[in-house]
Amino acid sequence: FAHAAVTASDYHLSTERYARGGIGQAGVKYSPFHAWIDEWSMKGPDLNSLKLKANGPSFYYEMELKARGPLIFHGNNGYSLKSPTGQASYYYSQPFYQIEGVINLPDGPVEVSGEAWFDREWSSQLLSNDQTGWDWFSLSFDSGAKLMGFRLRDDSGESFSAATWIEADGRSESFGPGEFLAEPISISQIADREIPTHWRVKLQKKSVDVEVVALN
């Protein structure tokens, strides 16, 4: 299954697909890399150079991505703890993509370029029975440095957190439970649910203390 979306300051467009691989409708090949579902695809010789395309009822995009830095392995060489009782995943990112392409919208095509972030995470475990939510952040700074951080909330209101600091040259450093903090500042009512849309994010050892506000 897959989903695709386009978000702007005043709207959000999204769609999703479900398909089976046995009849060729969806699948993944490692080399050369190709992941597809119907006419959506992510394709290239490898993860360093990809072409991405997807569409919905009111949008279509086709992008090219070029990696300008190394893959980043989170936690202990890619083994990312998710709870004090040992739940974990394998997790890596490519946060150094340069991206360019065209987004076709109801008002016409828009040429875009900038930075992109790719995540790959998988596990054979569920979260702990008392874990109720997952808040995840990826931040890019003017210096070229980047920060990935998350917290998993439990029934008591406590959270388990971890983070990775990524230098502009690709060097990275992992931070364990409690070192990354994400504190909700304000809550929005969305579809009868209370969703934090304004946060204070801190990683003291890297002098990070910033506010993060939802675009819409």
Image (cartoon, grey):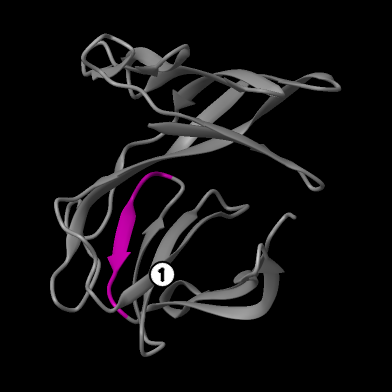
Asked if the magenta segment contains residue 63, the reply would be no
- The residue shown at (29%, 21%) is 20
Position in image of residue 56 (x %, y %): 62, 24
Q: Nearer the viewer, residue 197 or 174?
A: 197
79 to 47, vertically: above or below? below
Q: Helix or strand or loop: what does disc 1 sit on?
A: strand
Residue picked out by circle 1:
133
- The residue shown at (70%, 71%) is 188
- The residue shown at (21%, 14%) is 22
Q: Nearer the viewer, residue 139 or 150?
A: 150
- Specify whether 175 is left or right of 118: left
What is the magenta range? Answer: 169-177
Q: Nearer the viewer, residue 199 or 203?
A: 199
Asked if the magenta segment contains residue 175, the reply would be yes
Q: Residues within 10 Å of mark 1 (few under 14, many from 20)?
A: few
93 to 185, vertically: above or below? above
